[in-house]
Amino acid sequence: MSHQPPIKGKKEFRSFVLRLKKLNPPWRAKDITKFLHQSENTPCYTTRRALWLKVWRILKRNQVNDLPRSGAPRTTATTEYLQAVKKTIGLKRNASIRNVNAKLRKLGYKTSNTSVWRAKTELK
């Protein structure tokens, strides 16, 4: 057996698992996990079950690249929102985030304490 360097990145590991599946079509996640555990450079997963789950997910997705994340982008980064926060904070010298959030909600913004805090830190 030749010594192979350990698999480093996520994409390398995914492509390796998918290549193993391509070379051995009847193999399931359990068989690939067994093969990986018996190899010289076993992946650094805590348990065999964790490795099996990782391999199973890779086979289910059947792609090397990350999938796009779900959810809408943050709206707190818009210049309109930042200006509204700046204006509301400027009305009172030591305005609390809770009070600024309440005023913005009255103005019709869909906001939260966290988004006001994030916008406030961006303004500094």
Image: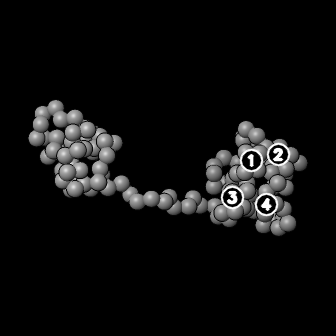
Q: Earlier in the sequence, mark 1 or mark 4?
A: 4
The amino acid type, in three-letter code, at marker 2 is His
x and y percentages locating residue 28 in the rendered image: 81, 60
Q: Which residue is mark 2?
A: 37
Per the model, the C-alpha gap separating discs 3 and 4 is 12 Å
**13 left or right, relative to 24:** left
Please tell me whether mark 1 sits on a helix, a strand or a loop.
helix
Q: Earlier in the sequence, mark 3 or mark 2?
A: 2
Asked if labels 4 and 1 touch by Cβ distance under 8 angstroms, the answer is no
Q: Which residue is mark 3?
A: 58
The amino acid type, in three-letter code, at marker 4 is Leu
Q: Which residue is mark 4?
A: 20
Snapshot quadrant of residue 94: top left
Observer-side mark, 3 or 2, equals 3
Q: For the view shown, which residue lies furthest in the right direction?
A: 1
Residue at screen point 19% across, 46% down? 103
Q: Earlier in the sequence, mark 4 or mark 2?
A: 4
**57 left or right, relative to 98:** right
Please tell me whether mark 4 sits on a helix, a strand or a loop.
helix
Observer-side mark, 3 or 4, equals 3
Observer-side mark, 1 or 4, equals 1
Q: Earlier in the sequence, mark 3 or mark 4?
A: 4
Tell which of 95 and 13 is nearer to you: 95
Up/down of 96 relative to 11, above or below:
above
